[in-house]
Amino acid sequence: INAATGFRRVDSAKIALARSYGASTLQIFWKIRAPMALPMILVGLMIGAIFGLLTAVGAEMVGGGFGLGNRLTSYSSMIQMPQFFAVVLILSTLGILIYVLFFLIGKKWASWEA
């Protein structure tokens, strides 16, 4: 959805200007559409990565197996609060690292967008 929004919000005047200079459809895509849509694509990837982490932990909590979600369930059921909060801290740190990673990528690759 974010990528589609990013491609839709490209200024049509820039595309018309590029066409008037004889730019091909492929050149317009790579030189105008893709760079203008990149910030929205990165936001979509960031949101998807964070929700992926949440989904993986939730699936481990429900489905069992071996992972941080399983650890959360077992530590909370055995009332081992220090270990439980250590896992919560690890998951929080992972979420923050994902956010910071995509923020830095966006700052480097899409610095023109606020």
Image (cartoon, helix red, strand yellow):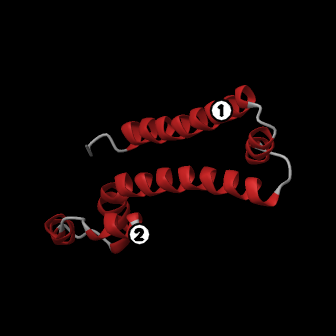
Image side of residue 68 versus residue 3, left or right: right
Mark 2 and mark 1 residues within 8 Å of each other at the beta carbon: no
Q: Residues within 10 Å of mark 1 (few under 14, many from 20)?
A: few
Residue at x-position 32% and y-position 58%: 31
Residue at x-position 21% and y-position 72%: 19
Query: Vertically, is 8 above or below 49?
Result: below
Residue highlighted by disc 1: 90
Q: Position of residue 64 (x, y in %)?
A: 83, 55
Splitting the image into 4 quarters, where does residue 92 fall? top right
Amino acid type of disc 2? Ile
Q: Residues within 10 Å of mark 2 (few under 14, many from 20)?
A: few
Badge 2 or badge 1: first in the primary sequence: 2
Residue highlighted by disc 2: 1
Image side of residue 5 versus residue 78, left or right: left
Residue at x-position 53% and y-position 57%: 48
Residue nearer the viewer, 62 or 19: 62
Query: Vertically, is 63 above or below 15?
Result: above
Q: Position of residue 89 (x, y in %)?
A: 62, 31
Q: Secondary structure at mark 2?
A: loop
Residue nearer the viewer, 34 or 98: 98
Image side of residue 112 versus residue 94, left or right: left
